[in-house]
Amino acid sequence: MKDTGFFAEFKKFISRGSVIDMAVGIAVGAAFTAIINSFVGDIINPIIGLLIGGIDFSNLQIVLKPATETTAAVAIRYGAFINSIISFVIIAFALFIVIKAFNKLKDAKKKEEAAAPATPPAPPADVQLLTEIRDLLKNRE
């Protein structure tokens, strides 16, 4: 049975290299996000907490409704939100540095290719043959 239609197109799409590269990028990005979250939660927040009076920065919140025996507290956890902002800025900065370095390498390669003298293409075979005949006739005289 020959693959045709939707599933054949999907199989072709999924087996392309760019999809695999994208999957690897997502996996590495998830691992990088975990590292950044740990960096923010375990290193940056304690320093900020120390600077603002020893408060656990990640637990900063405004309680709208206190917890009871049967329900959890309702609170605006602005400390967690600030953590997310710090994580985003660090990740964005790291990506900016990586992309900037990649573009610099790409531009250097383009400049190198542009600076290299291009050799003119060889003339077609019939023109080469006529040139050789002309040179032989010149030398014969």
Image (cartoon, helix red, strand yellow):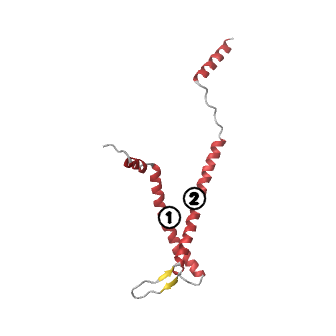
Q: In the figure, residue 113 lies in which quadrant? A: top right
Residue corresponding to mark 2: 98
Residue 75 is left or right of residue 105, and the answer is left
Q: Position of residue 13 (x, y in %)?
A: 43, 49
Residue at (61% x, 28% y) in the render: 122
Q: Give the structural element (helix, strand or loop) at label 2.
A: helix
Residue at (48% x, 57% y) in the render: 25
Which one is nearer the viewer's eye here, 14 or 125?
Answer: 14
User: With respect to residue 18, does 53 lie above or below?
Assistant: below
Q: Estimate the spatial distance between the alpha carbons at disc 1 and disc 2, rounded to whole Å.
A: 13 Å
Which one is nearer the viewer's eye here, 63 or 28?
Answer: 63
Which label belongs to residue 11? none
Task: Give the crowd class for mark 2: few <14, some 14-19, many >=20 residues within 10 Å.
Answer: few
Residue at (47% x, 82% y) in the render: 74
Which sits earlier in the primary sequence, circle 1 or circle 2? 1
User: With respect to residue 50, does 34 lie above or below?
Assistant: above
| Quadrant where the image shows the N terminus | top left
Residue at (60% x, 19% y) in the render: 129
Residue 81 is left or right of residue 116, and the answer is left
Residue corresponding to mark 1: 32
- Amino acid, disc 2: Val
Residue 71 is left or right of residue 76, and the answer is left
- Amino acid, disc 1: Phe
